[in-house]
Image (cartoon, grey):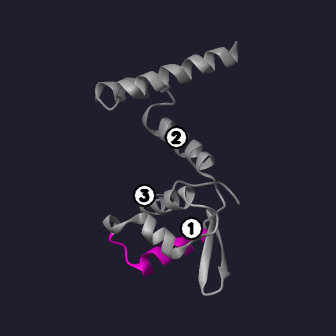
Amino acid sequence: MGTIKRLPDAEFELMKVVWRGKPGITTSEIIDGLGAASHWKPQTVLTMLTRLIEKGFLTSERVGRQRNYTAAVDEAQYMSIETGGFMSRYRGNSVGSLVKTMYAGKDLSAEDIEELRTWLDQKVKEKG
């Protein structure tokens, strides 16, 4: 696969269902995982699945009368690219600016801040 590109929001929502499921997730399991709130018709889901295969995000195989899907790009790999793209577009690659903006907007809970502190402490220890 070539360069991984950012997914449109709808395809990203679909990929989150695939990543949460076990490899070989079926079309009906994907539709169930999207939930009623998505209001997507089965044909819409099938179209998006086809696009994700064409983009190299999924592989599929026919098993009996159904099709099973497996992620060809794992979630951590995609999120690394998505986060890097976001950082360069909106914050000039400054993690500090991003965190300040999130904190000022009240988007960080006390638990988020503690998780961030723990992660930063671990990274400092690793750098030694």
To which quarter of the image does residue 44 belong?
bottom left
Query: Which range of residues does the magenta coloring cover?
Result: 39-54
Which mark, residue 52?
1
Q: List the residue tagged with mark 2.
A: 83
To which quarter of the image does residue 64 belong?
bottom right
Q: How would you rate the neighbour count of disc 1 (Cα within 10 Å): few for under 14, some for 14-19, many for 20 or more?
A: many
Image coordinates for residue 20, horizontal then vertical, percent:
54, 56
Which mark, residue 11?
none
Q: Nearer the viewer, residue 2 or 53?
A: 53
Q: Is residue 60 shown above or below 97?
A: below
- Secondary structure under badge 1? helix
- Contact between labelled residues 3 and 1, with CB atoms less than 8 Å apart: no
Q: The residue under label 1 is which amino acid type?
A: Leu
Closer to the chain start, of discs 1 and 3, is: 3
> Quick check: 106 left or right of 45?
left
Q: List the residue tagged with mark 3.
A: 9
Q: The residue under label 2 is which amino acid type?
A: Thr
Q: The residue under label 3 is which amino acid type?
A: Asp
Q: Quadrant of the C terminus?
A: top right
Q: Quadrant of the N terminus?
A: bottom right
Q: Is residue 37 magenta?
A: no
Closer to the chain start, of discs 3 and 2, is: 3
Q: Residue at x 50, y 60 (%)?
A: 17
Q: How would you rate the neighbour count of disc 3 (Cα within 10 Å): few for under 14, some for 14-19, many for 20 or more?
A: few
Image coordinates for residue 122, horizontal then vertical, percent:
61, 20
